[in-house]
Structures are given as C-alpha cells and as structure tokens.
Amino acid sequence: MDRWIPFFGDHRLLAMARAAQAEGRLPAELLMRLERLAERLDTYLTEPRHPSLLHGDLWTGNVLVRGQRIAGFVDPAIYCGHPEIELAFTTMFGTFGPAFFEAYEALLPLEPGFHELRSGLYKLYPTLVHVRLFGSAYVPPIERTLAHLGL
C-alpha cells in the first residue's frame, strides 16, 4: 500500500484480529472495538516521512549476540512501515532497555506521545498475534489499551 496507516489498520490490526476471532480466540465484541479503532487510526498515528525496513518480530530470541555485542538478527517477517511499531515491539518482552532508547533518541528523537500512547497502540498487533497463537491469556492487554483510548 502507499500509506502506512491504512496498511497498519487493514493488513496488521484487522487481519490478525479477524483471524483470531475466526479461530475462536478473540471475542466478537473485542473485534468490533478494534474495528472502531481502525476507523480512527489517523487520530492517533502519523504517516512516516519515509518507510523504514522493519524486522517484524524483534524480540530477544531473534537477536544474535556474541559476547557483549549484537552479531545479527533473525528476520522472519520483514516489511516496510513506521519505525515506531518496531520500537514498541521491543518493549513487550524487554528486548532492549532504557539505554537503547536513549541512544536511539540521541540520533533520531521520537515524536511526543510515543511512550504514553502510540507504543501501546502499536503493541496491539503483536499481542493479537499472541492471542491467535497462544490463546486468551493475551486478551487483557488488548482490552486495557482500547480502554485507554476510550474504545
């Protein structure tokens, strides 16, 4: 797609939510709330100045380390989009700590509201993947994020 926000809404959030709901892992009411969110994504998100190459599954298990250095990444799900989704994903399982974000923002400051709002919104997609793969134990974080957004 030519634009990030419709891609994220249609091909990430709603595609995964509908698949999880069809497999009986996501309540229909929660899918409806996610559909309302998708209609309003441009209220919360901005288009990136240019698309970034994204890892797509950046957690500790896909980071190869040798000694104290990162030696490489396993890239199972690359695509292009807004870099904030990747940064949000790294906060789900503690892949990188505060020192990473300090170094990142020294080079490329994040727009205001990332940590307070957009990080949680962007974590909806990988959390929906976990709902689909591992079940309803991952539903509460989705409910909390939607409630935080007033949905």
Image: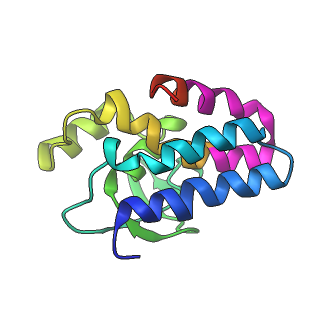
Rendering quarter of residue 81: bottom left
* Residue that lies at the very extreme toward the right in this rendered image: 24
Q: Is residue 56 left or right of residue 14?
A: left
Queried whether the magenta region covers residue 129, the answer comes back as: yes
Q: Where's the N terminus, which quadrant?
A: bottom left
> Viewer-proximal residue, 112 or 21?
21
> Viewer-proximal residue, 149 or 74?
149
Characterize the magenta stretch by its predominant secondary structure. Answer: helix
Q: Is residue 129 left or right of residue 105?
A: right
Relative image position of residue 49 (x, y in whole percent): 18, 63
Q: So how many labels did they put on this image?
A: 0
Rendering quarter of residue 53: bottom left
Queried whether the magenta region covers residue 73, the answer comes back as: no
Q: Residue at x 47, y 53 (%)?
A: 65
**Residue range (magenta):** 128-144
Residue 21 can be seen, yes or no? yes
> Viewer-proximal residue, 131 or 71?
131
Q: Residue at x 55, y 65 (%)?
A: 11
* Residue that lies at the very extreme toward the bottom in this rendered image: 1
Rendering quarter of residue 102: top left
Relative image position of residue 115 (x, y in whole percent): 33, 31
Q: Residue at x 38, y 46 (%)?
A: 87
Residue 72 can be seen, yes or no? no
Relative to 130, say whether 112 is above or below.
above
Relative image position of residue 36 (x, y in whole percent): 53, 43
Q: Is residue 135 left or right of residue 71?
A: right
Q: Residue at x 28, y 38 (%)?
A: 101
Relative image position of residue 112 (x, y in whole percent): 20, 34
